[in-house]
Amino acid sequence: MSRFKDLIFGDPTATRIVPPSGFTAALTLASAAAMAFLAVFAIALNLATGELANRWEAELAGTATVRVPPSGDIEARAEAVLVALSQTPGVVTARRVDDEEQLMLLAPWFGEGIPLDKLRLPVLIEVEETADGPDEVGLSARLDAEAPGTVYDDHSRWRLPLAEAAQRLRQLGAFALFLIGSVTAVTISLAASSALSANGQIIDVLRIVGAKDRWIASAFIRRFTVRAFVGAAIGTVAAMIAVALLPDGVEIGVLSGLGFQRSEWLWPLLVPFGAAGLAFAATWVAAARRLKEDG
Amino acid sequence: MIELKNVAMVYGEQTLFRDVALSLPAGSFHFLTGPSGAGKTTLLKLCSLEHSASSGDVALLGQSVADYNRDQIARLRRRIGVVHQESRFVDHLSVGENVMLPVAVTGGSAAAEGDLADLLSWVGLGAMVDRLPSELSGGERQRMALARAIILSPEIILADEPTGNVDWEMSLKLLDLLIELNRLGKTILCATHDLNLIRQAKSRVSSRVLRIKDGAVSLAGAGL
């Protein structure tokens, strides 16, 4: 633990040993900034898809639709179904969809002002279920007995593919984060290796004056960790501003409301720390390998 | 203090030297001379642990270094000050920071920082503590290298052609510093091909001359 603390908070002279500017410094800063920018959007995507999945689940779960086919005395059959539903455990409410609502449902296909009384339409009953819901097999059988051809639709046909799609999007967001992290680690590792090669003379000097490998490595680790943190902080702030400036209700494909709500704004703030952690590990590995090779 | 037993150095097919046996006691002053390419620098690098011997045993400060790991080598190097012909520095650090590097790698101490001003004055660089190495002349850089080499008060000082790139006047100043360090009890091994410098030293300090030639090291006669 103390070794770990030494690496992070140790001698500030060690940090100054590594030149403060140059190609590797610019590469680390720029790549950390770019990756952090992308990471913030990946987090936003992840949160939005998660929210979308939850919303779809919530909207479709706990409700069902009963369809009474238009045959015989449809009013009596509908009434019998409503009575049966009201007596069924697991059903909270059962309400017949009125004409106005039916007109709204049909308007996209048939336009406004359809004469409902001239069409043979099924009666639709909206059912609100308890958390456990009714015994669907038993209820379907009873409804079919009351009004043959009646269908009890618990929306699973719609709900499952939507929930699965949202879940896939969420996995995609997580994979994007993983890729961003990997690319960041590889880029910083290459930059650190390049810096170690470019500063061979400094390493020789340090060895001559009695520096241990851990001390030399810590100089490079701290410098690259700080650079990655600063770069990632710049990228994160830029991305947070960009997300904040997105218009409300912006739609990206099936997504709506890409952005952060309330405490979700804390998530992007973790990105610079994550980038610093990655830089720390990547530089440690690169430095250890390089110093061992040099002998 | 510095002891080499049957040491050989082989590069591929070429044997640079073989069966070298040396024993330099504490507080002694030795010059190492010989033609270019004879192996003076390599021998010094064996003593500063920058190279490992192909065979034989190197013992420094009473300890054989054959089985030393990297950390042990680093610790031992802190007890050996090294000045190269073209000493290298960290170019973006000031003279003061460069001289303090050995202190920094050992964890540093305020007392050592207090010594910095005295040390730089002693080598004649008192006014240059904030300059960059690139702003110094060849002689000033060599004195800075000497200051860095002795900041931790090492027991051994190895100097490889320390006057190689400076004029005669500066060579004498550097020699004065080495003689003074020897009088303080430091063991000095200085590689040089400058016979005038050796003669100057012998007139002022008890020193011996080792000659390396044709792969062997021998004690030079009084003719020098």
Image (tube, rainbow, N blue to C red):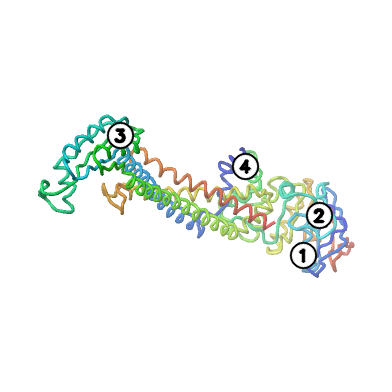
Q: Label 1: few (<14), some or many (≥20) within 10 Å?
A: some
Q: Nearer the viewer, mark 3 or mark 4?
A: 3
Residue type at tag 2 = Arg
The answer for which chain carries disc 3 is A
Distance between the alpha carbons at the discs numbered 1 and 2:
16 Å
Residue that badge 2 annotates: B204
Distance between the alpha carbons at the discs numbered 3 and 2:
107 Å
Let me know if marks 4 and 2 both belong to one chain. yes
Q: Which mark is residue A129?
A: 3
Element type at mark 1: loop
The numbered mark, 1 or 2, whose residue comes first in the sequence reads 1
Residue that badge 4 annotates: B113
Residue type at tag 4 = Glu
Let me know if marks 1 and 4 both belong to one chain. yes
- Residue placed at 35% from the left, 43% from the top? A51
Let me know if marks 3 and 1 both belong to one chain. no
Q: Specify whether A84 is left or right of B211.
A: left
